[in-house]
Image: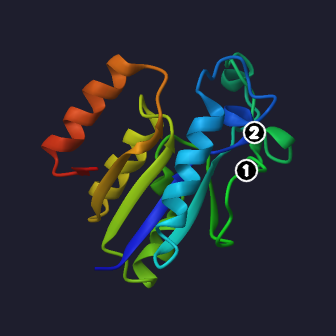
Amino acid sequence: MKKALLVIDMQNICVGENHAAYFKYNNADLIEAVNRVIDTNKENMVIYIKNVMKKNLLNKFAPFHAYEGTEEVELVNNLQMVSKNIFTKYEGNAFSNSALNEFLKKSDIEYVEVIGVDGGGRVELKSLGAIKEGYKVIVNENAIGTMFVKNKNKYFKQLKDLGAEFI
């Protein structure tokens, strides 16, 4: 079984020291939990996913801004970096970046484990994208930050119904 760990949106805008007020995680605990999972996955492929917003009229009114080339989109400094596998996404589903899927397929990845932010939407969208592309999905709840628990419960039920494994 070849597995990849997808580290989702662990960026300054979400969990950094000067994160946007919109994001309300226990940053230190979340970063520590994510780093622990990265530690246990060193034998697997570790991939970091960054969310970047396009400068357009719709995003101008978003509660936070994470534009290409800004400090906000960079991965948080105290995140453990064990690979240079970094992919950018401009939509909720990381698989909208075809380079990610091509990289996973070329590497014969069967399983993807997802950690990071946010269990109320972003993790779910990446997981659904992975399932749609034919990967088996593991959602590691020990290292997922969630702001909207009601959304998380709904999304996680949907993922369970589609065969995702939860640990």
- For residue 11, say whether it is visible: yes
**Residue 49's spot in the image, x, y percent?**
59, 54
SS for tag 1? loop
- Contact between marks 1 and 2 (CB within 8 A): the answer is yes
Residue 108 image point, x, y percent: 37, 83
Residue for point 16% across, 51% down: 163
- Residue wearing tag 1: 75
Badge 1 density bin: few <14, some 14–19, many ≥20, Cα 10 Å:
many
Separation of residues labelled 1 and 2 (CA atoms): 6 Å
Name the residue nearer the viewer: 30 or 155.
30
Q: What residue sits 50% from the left and 74% below the top?
A: 45
Position above or below: 100 against 88: below
Residue 84 vs 96, above or below: the answer is below
Task: Name the amino acid type tagged 2.
Answer: Asn
Report x, y in % for residue 135.
29, 65
Q: Nearer the viewer, residue 109 or 113?
A: 113
Q: Give the percent coordinates (x, y) of residue 107.
A: 44, 83
Q: Quadrant of residue 90?
A: top right
Considering the image in quadrants, where does the N terminus appear? bottom left
Q: Is residue 90 left or right of residue 13?
A: left
To which residue does mark 2 refer?
12
